[in-house]
Image (cartoon, rainbow, N blue to C red):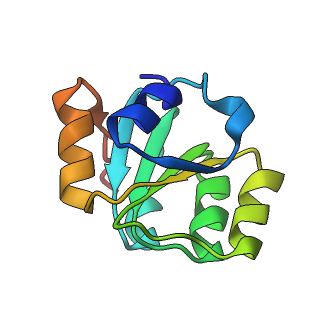
Amino acid sequence: MKLLEIKSLLDAEILSGHQFLDREVTNAFAADLMSDVLAFVDDKTLLLTGLTNPHTIRTAEMMDIHSIVFVRGKRPDEETIRMAEENDIVTMTTRNILFVASGILYSKGLSGANIIHK
């Protein structure tokens, strides 16, 4: 699923990475604990979260995640958006809660990320 379609489905506002909306994601992972995000590795994963601090961007960078949706209308501060821009990470915000945003994307065919059990 292309990020432009995700933006439309979630009625989201793009915060960074406008030039990368043609990127494709194949699955999604929803979490507010970045330690949970660190528990899996998968290419082309979309991260949905309510956590808007720089740690989210650092985690995405480490895990090679190139797109993040902030839920509940949350907006990261300018420093966090700048970090996302510097790392070519698309960020967007939606007014949907995490459960609803995940459900919308799942109902349109986006699958959940594969968790790697250690």
Picture mark count: 0
Q: Quadrant of the C terminus?
A: bottom left
As drawn, 103 above or below 8? below
Residue 35: x and y, percent? Answer: 43, 71
Q: Is residue 20 visible?
A: yes
Q: Identify the image quadrant of the N terminus.
A: top left
- Picture quarter containing residue 73? bottom left
Residue 14 in the image: state x and y as whole percent. 58, 47
Residue at (77% x, 53% y) in the render: 85
Q: Hey, which residue is sitting farthest right in the picture?
A: 86
- Name the residue: 34% across, 60% down: 95
Q: Position of residue 81 (x, y in %)?
A: 70, 64
**Residue at 54% across, 70% down:** 75
Location of residue 33 (image quadrant):
bottom left
Residue 19 sits above or below residue 63 on the image: above
Q: Is residue 42 visible?
A: no
Q: Is residue 84 left or right of residue 32?
A: right
Looking at the image, residue 35 lies above or below residue 29: below
> Does residue 19 appear left or right of residue 30 in this picture?
right
**Image vertical order of residue 57 relative to residue 100, above or below:** below
